[in-house]
Amino acid sequence: MKHILGAKALRKVIAGALVLFSAIAVADEGMFPISDIGSLDLKKIGLDLTAEQIFNPNEVCLVDGICRVNGCTGSFVSSKGLIITNHHCAFAAIQAASTPEHDYLNNGFSASSNIEEIPAPGYTVRITEGYEDVSTKVLSVVKPGMTFSERTKAIEKQQKQLEKDAEAANVGMRAEVAEMFTGERYVLFLYTYIKDVRLVFAPPASVGNFGGEVDNWEWPRHTGDFSFMRAYVAPDGSSADYAKNNVPYQPKRVIKVAAEGVNENDFVMLLGYPGRTVRHNTASFLQYEENVRLPFVVDLYGWEIATMEAAGKDDRGVALKLSSRIKSLANVEKRSRGQLKGLNRIGFVNKRRVDEEVLQTFIDSDPARKARAGNLLSDIDAVYAEITANAPLEMNLSNLPSACQTLSFAFTVIDAAHERAKEDIERESQYTDRNYPLTRQRLQLALNDFHLETDQLMLAEMLRRLEAAGATKLLPTVAGELLGGSETERQQRATKLINNSKMHNAEFAMKCFDMTPEQLVSTKDPALVLMSELYPVYLAQREKNKEREGKLSQLYGLLISEKREFLKTAFVPDANGTLRMTYGRVESYSPEDAVIKTPITTLKGMLDKVTGIDPFIAPPRIGELYRAQDFGRYVNPKLNDVPVAILYSTDSTGGNSGSPILNSRGELVGVNFDRAFEATINDFAWNHAYSRSIGVDIRYVLWISDKVYGAKHLISEMGIE
Amino acid sequence: MKHILGAKALRKVIAGALVLFSAIAVADEGMFPISDIGSLDLKKIGLDLTAEQIFNPNEVCLVDGICRVNGCTGSFVSSKGLIITNHHCAFAAIQAASTPEHDYLNNGFSASSNIEEIPAPGYTVRITEGYEDVSTKVLSVVKPGMTFSERTKAIEKQQKQLEKDAEAANVGMRAEVAEMFTGERYVLFLYTYIKDVRLVFAPPASVGNFGGEVDNWEWPRHTGDFSFMRAYVAPDGSSADYAKNNVPYQPKRVIKVAAEGVNENDFVMLLGYPGRTVRHNTASFLQYEENVRLPFVVDLYGWEIATMEAAGKDDRGVALKLSSRIKSLANVEKRSRGQLKGLNRIGFVNKRRVDEEVLQTFIDSDPARKARAGNLLSDIDAVYAEITANAPLEMNLSNLPSACQTLSFAFTVIDAAHERAKEDIERESQYTDRNYPLTRQRLQLALNDFHLETDQLMLAEMLRRLEAAGATKLLPTVAGELLGGSETERQQRATKLINNSKMHNAEFAMKCFDMTPEQLVSTKDPALVLMSELYPVYLAQREKNKEREGKLSQLYGLLISEKREFLKTAFVPDANGTLRMTYGRVESYSPEDAVIKTPITTLKGMLDKVTGIDPFIAPPRIGELYRAQDFGRYVNPKLNDVPVAILYSTDSTGGNSGSPILNSRGELVGVNFDRAFEATINDFAWNHAYSRSIGVDIRYVLWISDKVYGAKHLISEMGIE
């Protein structure tokens, strides 16, 4: 799954609100906000806890033991700030610490004491402390006669103001306003915010990423996708940047590790921070995804991945630099293929269209409703038609500075120079005072992973694509001159630009952060010159996006209220990076005719997959221990084997990576890390028949840590005897 | 599966006799010769028939209703010679009759009366009438002091003599001597032999080949892989070549069609002509397959398939010409990949090596046995080591005239000219008087499918491969001059040779059959000049193969007798194209950890697979009838759907294509057509856990014929009310 969402990116999502008509009982589908847990019949569901035991802003509760780790979720499993999350969530930290000489990615890492733990730059941990409905406050700034773009900007500004105010009133805490229902419901969340995070234990990639991209998004799975990190605070307990004398954070609540694990048909629930779903969007949106955006992503990312893999083939140093980026692109590429496959299934988009026809009939049946919302669906369709028409050029333009790092760095410093000149509250979120240090740090981390030859190829390819998308006539002078001519010429121009730019020089790049837009141009750095020239194009695009967002926000807001009237039901809001609870059972499913996938995999199954060729290599010690049947207390007696991964019917998405899999008593029985291939379509629609989440069984986590890597100190720290 | 073996190729197999030590009860594994059926406890197995009801040379029995159709199997399902077999078995006949204007491959074919049935040139039908153990007679010609090559030739000659004698004594019948245990047991089979075969009904490829190469060798499956043909004889009942006034053959026995089909866990058996297994071969043989031969096949065939697919992409005429060859190569290519995957599984080759070590210890434990067989295993290993060392050049040389058709034609006429000059009994089998007409006919059929541009590419590629395999220094003048230089030069030389040759001109090619070797060279046709020059190289290779065969025959003969002593058990002989019975149940299996595949697929499952993109297109009428739930009497009431394909635990291999799937009363419940991917390894070892065969359910056959294509006359002809 591994889709780690940027902290603030979530609110930007053009989310909608048309519910699935062919819907399953809400009780099954939902990713329930913590504010809604009280409305569920928890006992009936199978839980032995009350809603207050799960979340209570005034008392210590289960949620105090759950945290967000960048775009992932983690659990506190000791009173000394020990966090368990996924290997892929700690990947960037492991990669940053790895060199060909100390290759923690290949060999794994285990700190035998606090002093050996490695700082994880760019990592933050947050714990949900409370929430407040701020819908009225947010929407009070929307005035009649505003353009759609003005509407979007007014809401954004108000959100920033509310966050600022809340942080001033709760010193040391972090505040975030999340949109729960587009244009309708907004909630302010308060978080404890920890900035010193360190790597404690990571198995080698041959365990933590066993099966690699071949197995990613697939079941059966045999990946030991877990790692341990630790949260640190200043000696006085306050949040602080990394410092040697910081001390482990003491969580209010520790999640108990249930070393006995879980069995088929058992109740499980996840608590976590699912990133983004768009289940309420229209058929026209799905059609755009199916015909335009997803194929583009599969094609471009596939090319980028192949290019980077070729670059790192014979040079471990280069491979390490590029590994995190490859992993993240490959994850999205394969998810997109899964979504395409799901959408291609005859009937998916059509079914939603049929649902919409039924709704349209309902709307048209009442004159007042018709006057209010008769054109609603066609208005939404028109927005996607417009997006589709402009997609080839827009998608390539927006991917130019993500494919080519040099241009990405240049764009960031130019954008910062313009934005930082504004009032704090007026800036794009990433340049506000509270976020700017993180923006700078991320650029610095990206500079560490820069690879010159790859960047030359990326730029040439993006120029080729821009040209094919008809950019030649639309772009200004400097950019225009890069286009045209033969492939060789394009490559030469790209190589020259990358070579002549200093943007990938860390010292120069950081100095750029202190320059004005004019000073940046006057450096004559070709990347800065190019991106300065293109900057108005990107600004216009930003403006256009806000306008679309404003329009869709208003339309989807109206749509969901019509839907509520029609279906006479409450909806669970789409995932938006805020804390949610979802529940289900450890259970099999049938992905296709005549195939049943059962929900527990084993060491034996893992060893059967081993070919000795990456990604199907296992550390020899696993085979030795297996042959010696040395399972210790981590055996599943029914299977006479160590359970490796489990499959369950919860409702999850990206951001749920690292979520604790909890039993009915709220004890940790595993760590969530993925979904089955058929469940990639979860982002558009959940279905009990095929939506399955995948996690690593706690017994495998413990067996690997204890028996295979001898990290007995961690076992005791978690209180397992 | 679709591996259609040439009639005589089977006896040429270098087969061995070392049994699997880690063997399963013989009762489960076997492909039992009809002579062995009497030794089975049929009642206990689940059969309601006696051995005599299955086979009795003196009375009408079940076997009289089973026939061999070229390399496949078929069943007589009416008293008027109607045969049911696979779509892929009739493929060459459908293809030969198809043109872009009358595209029976794409659109299907249905003759509404006998007069509309289309002759299937090159097709023959044979029915087993009796057998005789001729081991003593065959082995009587082996004399002490013979070289291995002399030994092979003496045995071959004696087999031909026995066949000739038997055919003289049974006029109109066909005789074949089959090697049951290498160098040990030989059986002469007598067959009724029919030469006028016609196409009666074939569904379109979108049914008969639904899923194409993507689904080939896979379960779950939704392929309607069946067709109907008809056997014709002269008005007096004798076997005759095609003639308009021939009449339908009247089989002694008709296989009753059980329209009620079969259910999960039901007993099933196959009768058929499995082509070739090598289950008794050594670890060194398996290692050669894994490291050398199978990777070569996957690589070369993969290239050939891609080349032919590209050639036919925009020209249906070319696509039709190449379709049969593509299908046959693709089938072997994917099977080879399955076998490689099976062999790669840790332990397969090693396990057999361990078994051999145990046997070696047994041999060494007795001085007399050690003196007799102490070097047996190492001697066999040495043969495969020699084969491996010479493989790159030998494999490319032997594939030169199979990849390049022009050279194949040239080789055949040169070989014929040399061989036909010999006494009939001394000739290679395909040039003996009894086989020569078929050899000529096959060349003529191949000429119909010749495609010039493809042949140019094939030759250039084979030259490249020969050069890479070090052929430059080894080949004589003309061939040597084709090698070397740039890729462009090689392609130019290849194009020139193919263009300047007349071998692909049907008239010229057939005239060549009447020329002497000298006359062939004097035509100066470049293909004839080249292959005449290379002919001694191929003759030497033929000699070398006979020597290896002779050596392995003797060694494996000794090995199996040692094995029998050690295991104190009788073995079922490897498949060799003779009639066999195998039984099992309709049952699920687990191909891997956490996956269960259940044994019946449905129309719904088929429609779920439909993407509208080849090979997942279904005729619209199937969807219409499905939505109307118009299943007629062909419904499986439990599923409320028409069962499409079934999976069962019989022991089958190539040649079992088209075999009747019979219930415990010997009635037809389906038609066998494939194996599961894991069962490709069947050829090396059978295992109840993963060896599954795949067939089309008779209810799908009948539903397609009756409801979808309205061939109600066939339904009545089969006696279904």
Image (spheres, coloured by chain):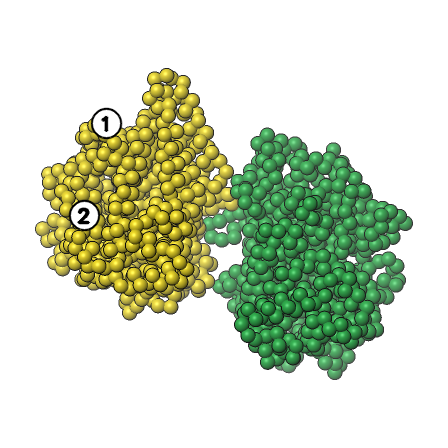
Chain colours: A yellow, B green
- Identify which residue is drawn at 62% across, 61% down: B454
Give me the disc on residue A251: none
Task: Please tell me which residue lies in front, B335 or A377.
Answer: A377
| Chain that bears disc 1 | A
**Which quadrant holds residue B619?**
top right
Is B9 rendered above or below residue B370?
A: above
**Badge 1 or badge 2: first in the primary sequence:** 1
Residue type at the position of mark 1: Gly
On the question of residue B259 being in view, the answer is yes
In this picture, residue B405 sits left or right of residue B509: left
| Chain that bears disc 2 | A
Q: Name the quadrant of the N terminus of chain B.
A: bottom right
SS for dot 1: loop
List x then y, in percent, for residue A185: 25, 31
Q: Name the quadrant of the C terminus of chain B.
A: top right
The residue pinned by badge 2 equals A418
Q: Dot 2, crowdedness within 10 Å: few (<14), some or many (≥20)?
A: some
- The residue lying furthest to the right in this view is B236
SS for dot 2: helix
**How far apart are labels 1 and 2 at the CA level?**
28 Å
Give me the disc on residue A145: 1
List x then y, in percent, for residue A118: 22, 60
Is B149 rendered above or below residue A561?
A: below
List x then y, in percent, for residue A463: 36, 55
Residue type at the position of mark 2: His
- Identify which residue is drawn at 32% across, 49% down: A475
**Which quadrant holds residue A693?**
top left
